[in-house]
Amino acid sequence: GTASALVRARSVDDVVRTLRFASERGIPVVTRGAGTGLAGGANAVDGCILLSVAGLDRIVRVDEAQRIAVVQPGVLNAALAKEVAARGLYYAPDPASREISTIGGNIATNAGGSCCLKYGVTGDHVAALEVVLADGTRVRTGALTKKNVAGLDLTRLLVGSEGTLGVIVEASVRLLRAPRAPSTMVAFFDTLADAAAAIVEMDARLELSLLEVMDRTTVRAVEDMTHMDLDVEAAAMVLLQSDAEGAAAAIATCQRICEGHAAKSVLCTEDLEEGRMLLLARRMALPALEKKGTTLLDDVAVPKPAIPHLLAQISAIAERLGLVIGTFGHAGDGNLHPTIVFDTRDEASAARAYQAFDEIVRAALALGGTITGEHGVGNLKRDYLTAMVGEAERALMARVKAAFDPKGILNPGKAI
């Protein structure tokens, strides 16, 4: 869509006045942070006011005693992580976009990341919010106490609402003590089935901090881009880390499990820099695939025992439709990112790409999964929501939306 105006907020008062202006005139408002979202949630709609909160980028305070950071929505994830790390603390949510995505955007989509296997997603670390409602009313939700059961949990409701219920102007997020440096293992497999079986067993037996997978298409794309000497003949690469006490023993157990599932090679390391380089290979998956053509990125999640079935179905879809699909993701929590590479100049190729996207989403649903694990619904997957939640639940979501935003001006056509 095409916005009619852009407001770059420099204060909370700018947000309040913008929303009052829009509410009085029935003008839609789309809130935007860094614009790194992958489901179109921050895309403009025709005639809207595009409200940028990227300029609200102060770390207001870090309370080391309570392990709480109070931040504005435009603070970059990595900037917060760096600030608290200097104090021996840890902000756990680590989306791949952490260097360029904002805390406000992370909260709006309830972003995940590689380490959410152990530490949870963004919403698990949000203690309290200050939001501005559609009519300009400022509301504070949540509390900084360890426990709080007073009234409805509006904080959890606002997390993941993709800008449809209010505009986040401040967040209080929980911090952890910095964990030990992780031990790392990477294993290569000749078949996706063997890799998937190893993943399921390792996750069932051990508490790992990270458990990732990349298929051959993705590994080859990353190797072409980074020249890291990855095994490009393997069908799958599995990467895992443990930052717990006794991590070396956990990694040794993982090595035995992978070898028991016919891993062709296994590398274990305690070296922090080597571990970072291996993790970089995983984080470069999407940029590497994007160099191969236009990409249509999926974000589905299934119960962990269903991972082998989903991987097999993705491979079958790619072969049947004659498409390149690189699959990578957070295998430890069943969240995969099948990435379809196609040529937009070829109408037939584009049509097959969107058919594959549709079939993958429906395959995940059939396996008891979700249409989105961490990227959000946005406008990309809005049409699939009813298939997942049903008419009654979707109608209830619409009623909640109407309670927060009676005129329907906040991010219309997105998420619900």
Image (cartoon, rainbow, N blue to C red):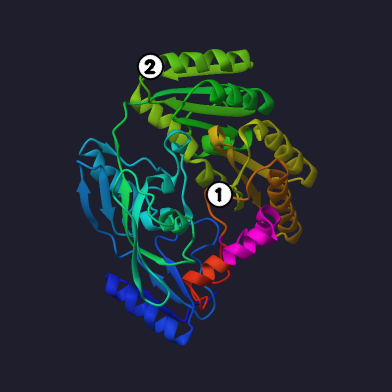
Q: Of tags 2 and 1, which is closer to the observer?
A: 2
Relative vertical location of residue 332 with respect to residue 54 in this rendering, above or below: above
Can you tell which mark lies on residue 173?
none
Percent across and percent down for residue 68 are: 26, 46
Q: Specify whether residue 382 is painted magenta.
A: yes
Label 1: which secondary element: helix
In terms of depth relative to the viewer, which is nearer, 128 or 145? Answer: 145
Query: Horizontal placement of 378 versus 75: left or right?
Result: right
Q: Quadrant of residue 85?
A: top left
Dominant SS type (magenta): helix
- Which mark is on residue 246? 2
Q: Which mark is residue 290?
A: 1
Secondary structure of the residue carrying tag 2 is loop
Q: Is 122 situated left or right of 305 in this image?
A: left
As for residue 211 lying within the magenta part, the answer is no
Q: Amino acid at mark 2?
A: Gly
Question: Can residue 4 be seen from the camera position used here?
Answer: yes
Furthest-right residue in this view: 320
The amino acid type, in three-letter code, at marker 1 is Glu
Magenta stretch, residue numbers? 378-398
173 or 72: nearer the viewer: 173
Q: Residues within 10 Å of mark 1 (few under 14, many from 20)?
A: some
